[in-house]
Amino acid sequence: MNTATSPRSTGRHRLVGLAVAAGVLASTCVLSLAVGTENVGLPTVWQAVTDYGDVGNQWIVHDLRIPRTLLGIVVGVALGVSGALIQGVSRNPLADAQILGINSGAGLFVVAAIAFLGLRSLWSYVWFAFVGAFVAMVLVYLIGMTGRAAATPVRMLLAGVAAGAVMEGISFGIRLRNPRAFDSMRYWDAGALDGHSLAVVAAIAPFVVVGVVLCLYVGRGLNAVALGDDLAVAMGGNVVRTRLIGLVAVTLLAGAATAGAGPIGFVGLMVPHAVRWFTGPDWRWICAYCVFAAPALLLAADVLGRVVVRPGELPAGIVTAFVGAPVLIWLVRRRTAAGL
């Protein structure tokens, strides 16, 4: 037996790859703490993290960049895992919370809560983000399944783009009619990690943790769903339960990410496809890799946005859009994606 292709060898290689992904995430965290409009030396970063004394530039790291980095980790995990879940549950390789309009739905409900109800605290409007994400998800599925044709990935993609455009248009209309809401959401709408406190991280982290746990729970079921509903049922899988739990997890993850940092797109699309080169088709490993790879990508985009237009900054959501749009075009042009 060739040990290079044995299950034990494959599992060992996946574990090594997972450790490498964790190392890459740790490196991007260091860059996020050190690099910006004002670069901070690594000794100062270490002192600010381990023994903060409000000396020199330590306040930049302690007060500004630690909350920003932690938010990037939490939001990145949410985006990556939710993207993997959507692709696995729907068997749609082009699925993503932003492309399918889920982030737009969450953003619309947050804007409405601020404009019409006067809510200002994240703890108050995060629930509206969850409701908006769920409503958008249901709406896209209903539109995609209308008519005689089956709900193919292309139909779902078009339904998501159309529904997302409508909800974003309504959201912009509300903000233009309500200057207070517009001022509150202007920078949030671009998908920015800066300007948030640790309280924001603490508010969304529990929902992200629950979403990740649900994802790991349905990982084996996603592998069965990938074979098709009929075969999954024949193998003893519960397709309805897997999809239901998966959609609940997507609602929690996408809603928390949108409430905390705004609608950041394409991370959930790119990362599952990238890690699949190392993990193969096993959704349990894909989700596990996304926990490390997605926040690393988001933090790298955030760091890049700090240095390309100095002394200003580009929000991370804009950077991921620049990178993600070509990736989406490439995926659409692939025969394997178009034929699913």
Image (spheres, grey):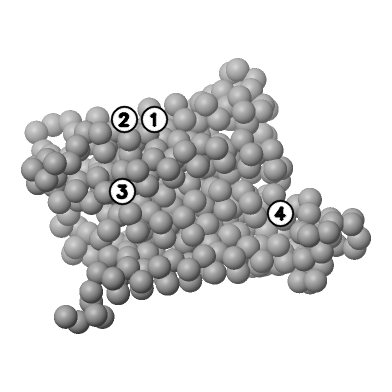
Residue 204 located left or right of residue 267: right
Ranked by sequence position, the earlier of labels 4 and 1 is: 4
Ranked by sequence position, the earlier of labels 3 and 4 is: 4
Q: Secondary structure at mark 1?
A: helix
Residue 202, relative to residue 266: is it above or below?
above
Residue 157 vs residue 49, the one in the foreground: 49
**Amino acid type of the residue tagged 4 in the rendering:** Ile
Residues marked 4 and 2 touching at CB (< 8 Å)? no
**Image quadrant assignment for residue 121:** top right
**Amino acid type of the residue tagged 3 in the rendering:** Gly
**Amino acid type of the residue tagged 2 in the rendering:** Val
**In this figure, which residue is indicated by the disc labeled 2?**
138
Instruction: Tell me if residue 165 can be seen.
Output: no
**In this figure, which residue is indicated by the disc labeled 3?**
219
Which callout, 4 or 1, points to the residue nearer the camera? 4
**Res 66 label:** 4
Distance Cα–Cα, label 3 vs label 2? 22 Å
**In this figure, which residue is indicated by the disc labeled 1?**
134
